[in-house]
Image: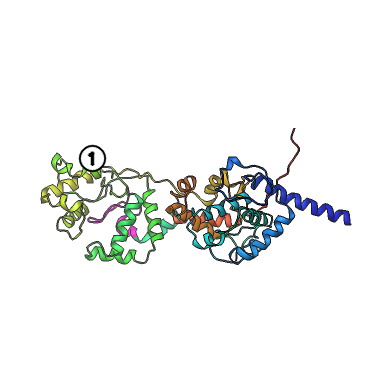
Amino acid sequence: MAIENKMRNALKLLTWAGLGLVSLGFLSAHTGAMAQSAPPAAEELRPLYAMGADLTDGKELAAATCARCHGLDGVSPTKDAPHIGGQRPSYLYLELKAYQAGARSNVEMAQKVKFLSDDALVKVAAYYAGLDPAPLPEGAAPQYVDPVAAGKAAAEPCAKCHGDNGISHTPGVPNLIGFSTKYLVEAMKAYKEGDRTLDAKNEKMKSAIVALSDQDLGRVALYYALQTQGLTHAQTASEGNPAVSKDSLGRCVKCHGENGVGTSPATPSLAGQDWAYMVKALHSYKDKSRDDDVMSPRAAKLDETEMKDLAAYYDVLTPKPVDTPKPLSPTEWAEKCDRCHGPNGNSVRANVPALAGQRMDYLQNVLTAYQTGARKSSEMSAMSGVLSQDDIKGIAGYYAYQKARAVVFVTVPGK
């Protein structure tokens, strides 16, 4: 029995040592008397063993410095603080160094680690890396909400005036197809917040939109932006002459294009738009009841005939599909994330964090921080920059309910 216990303890120590060997490899000697320095690049990692005494010291440091937020067992009891039990030790060390260097904006964390030596950081990282990962959250995983389906459901009240697929059959009511999501969301917010002139029709618009959250508005805009089949101009009458003069058209093409397709996400496409709605909009810009620094000066130069002819010109054009990608499900996003973060978020790379079993609120905050630039990483900023609120919530929920697995590295003799 004594021999078995000795073997078990030896294997446990080898597991800890193996973790240190690969993940804490940028330090070339044992953990004693290490000078503080900036963390080197991942390709500079060199072997380092964390022994039993180091782990004991790491536990004492963790109890004094880290446990209040991250738990002594590495399972965070604090909202927005990550679980760090079983996390990749090199990643933990590099993150602690980043806080020390002021590369992170978390003041509390920076103060906690400000005066810790490399020796202390290594021991804390090795201690937490040797713990079991956090257990799965209780209860069922959050249900994924398909934003397109949700947008279609939220848009049902719109169909009465704007048509089932966003193609208007009512004079004075605009088509909702062919717009970027950015433009359509801003337009709906303008009605919701009273920035558009509130006549009888617009009062109906405001009352219909006021109950929708910003997330709902984004979903509605996404639903209409993804309409690509059977696109046609508004099914309403036009009274102007579409053979518009070049001078009149010249005021519009820079932003709206000769083919009626907006030249930026913030500019509406006019191809196929309802004639009466466009004439009314031009009048509103001209009398500044709908004031705009770009549109109002241009509309002021148009007479009644020019307005009607411009509206007729764009009315007969065929709308074009918006270049809006269909959103991915959390599982589809995870296939991309797993390329760096490992199968189901269980990283096998020394300097890349495991995501499996992480707190959902923490993952959401981190993705948002990369998206806004509050947290710096060229790779993560590029990836997160295209994520919607639905994407971020879905990805965070997916990984929070993946089983986290500790990684054991086995060292073998060289050839």
In the rendered view, how is the structure colored? rainbow
x then y, percent, for residue 178: 32, 47
The C terminus sits in image quarter: top right
x then y, percent, for residue 119: 64, 53
In which quadrant of the rendered view does residue 83 lie? Answer: bottom right
Of residues 183 and 42, which is closer to you in this image? 42
In which quadrant of the rendered view does residue 73 lie? Answer: bottom right
Q: Secondary structure at mark 1?
A: loop
Magenta stretch, overall SS: loop
x then y, percent, for residue 41: 56, 43
* Residue segment shown in magenta: 158-178
Q: Residue at x 60, y 55 (%)?
A: 117
Instruction: Judge from the rendering whether residue 63 lies leftward or rightward of residue 104; answer left or right.
Output: right
| Magenta segment includes 186 | no
Tag 1 residue: 258
Of residues 18 and 51, which is closer to you in this image? 51
Q: Residue at x 76, y 53 (%)?
A: 12
Q: Residue at x 25, y 40 (%)?
A: 259
Q: Residue at x 17, y 46 (%)?
A: 310
Whether residue 190 is visible to the viewer of this picture, yes or no, is yes
- Residue flagged by tag 1: what amino acid is it? Glu
The N terminus sits in image quarter: bottom right
